[in-house]
Amino acid sequence: MVDIDARQRLKLLAGAASAALWGCSGGGGGSDMGPVTPSPTPPTPTGFQPSDGLLRNTFRNNFTVGAAVQTSQVSNNSAISDIVTSQFNTIVSEFEMQPNIIAPTEGMFDFSAGDELVQYAEDNGLEIHGHSLLWHEITPDYFFEGTRDEIKARLQNYVTTVVSHFRGKISVWYALNEVVDSTGVGTTLPYRNSNWYQAAGGPEYIDWVLEAARAADPDAKLYINEYTTELPNKRARLIQVVEDLVARDIPLDGVGHQCHLILQDTAQSVLDAIDAVDGLFAGLSNRITELDVSVYSDPGSCWENGTNCDADYGSNIPESVLDSQAQLLRELFNGLILKSSLDSVTFWGVSDRDSWLNTSPVTRSNYPLLYDRNLNVKTGFRAITDRNFVI
Ligand code: G3I
């Protein structure tokens, strides 16, 4: 029996839980598994006010720094938008470019939300990344109807339509989301035994996506995007998948490391994941694509059935916890600036109040990002932008 460590079980079950709630095949997004609705009136920031561009300029010689955003969060000159345009140089759509939003029913494409984000990026001089062309968790049912050839044709038409639509505006696609097996058990190793794997009768759907995307926009960079690459067992399976794609000259430009971390993680484990790609694939680059640091570790049954979860801190998060988070971030970024293959780091949100982790695995207050619920910078922001800042 493979020992699935708590976090892998956490992520694995998170996927199952969120798939169930997001209506993974319904296409509608199902229950709101995303962030809690932001407060209506932006609070007045207090405390340290970073100078314009401090975060992105700290790393301007190393990699771009981005945030996942939702169209609703950045429209109408919101306070979140002010932070994004002041401190970041890239954005990624948190969910509006996923298949269940763009093509919830066959033959109909709705790019309105994605286009709004692209326009926002253009208006504010931001680079925008696409996320994602395929994700088993939120693929509408109709994608799996018909013969294998019909499924292939439908998927390649979807990818061609989407990448062509955004050609010249989106130059980086996290094309394949979570296609690698995360449990280390089962017969489809190293591939996730997903609805896509079953519909295609194997991993060839991965080729279909990458080949169609490359044909639609030869200039777009294509990534395979995975969580827990900081864990050696998962990383080994990812490397197997990448090795096969590279060996067969299937279009691929790099690896996205989601990095949904917990306080018990080490910076070195993330750096090892980047080194593993660098050591084997000289032509590929790395990106950190969904960085956050949960303040809960939740070993055991929390993600299975919502029991035995770490107690909710509520509004009383101890400074010591935020200091530990800041120390981990400082060690991580001190290592990341040494990785020449690392093109970008994206946080999975701006403010703690909007994180997906406020509703996964249970509804409770999480504190995983750089800005607090009052849109003040946290200790982690100070720790990575000021080497003299004392945590
Ligand atoms: O904002 C709308 C709301 O107006 C509407 O009433 C409600 C019900 O339809 O939906 C709300 O949008 C939801 C959105 O989260 C914001 O809350 C979408 O339905 C829901 O699908 C969306 O979930 C996103 C999820 O991916 C599925 O796309 C989460 O925000 C997002 O954080 C999560 O991100 C994933 C990555 O793609 C892959 N890695 C793991 C990561 C976390 O699960």
Image: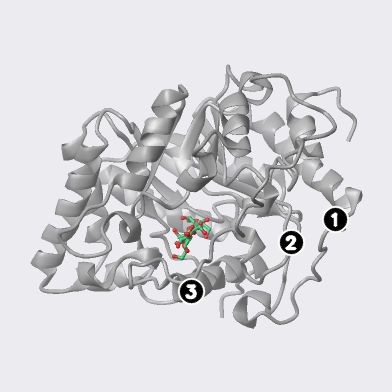
Cα separation between marks 1 and 2: 9 Å
Q: Which residue in the structure is indicated by mark 3?
A: 21
Q: Residues within 10 Å of mark 3 (few under 14, many from 20)?
A: some
Task: In this rendered view, identify the residue nearer to me: 367 or 277.
Answer: 367
Which mark, residue 365? Answer: 2
Which mark, residue 317? Answer: 1
Looking at the image, tell me whether mark 2 or mark 3 is earlier in sequence order. 3
Identify residue type, mark 2: Ser
The answer to whether marks 1 and 2 mark residues whose Cβ atoms lie closer than 8 Å is yes
351 vs 283: above or below: below
15 on left or right of 158: right
Cα separation between marks 1 and 3: 28 Å
The answer to whether any part of residue 250 appears in the image is no
x and y percentages locating residue 73 in the rendered image? 54, 44
The residue under the point 52% across, 39% down is 74
Looking at the image, tell me whether mark 1 or mark 3 is earlier in sequence order. 3
CB at disc 2 and ligand 1 closer than 8 Å: no
160 on left or right of 242: left
x and y percentages locating residue 106 in the rendered image? 18, 64
Looking at the image, tell me whether mark 1 or mark 2 is earlier in sequence order. 1
Identify residue type, mark 1: Ile
356 on left or right of 141: right
Q: Residues within 10 Å of mark 1 (few under 14, many from 20)?
A: some
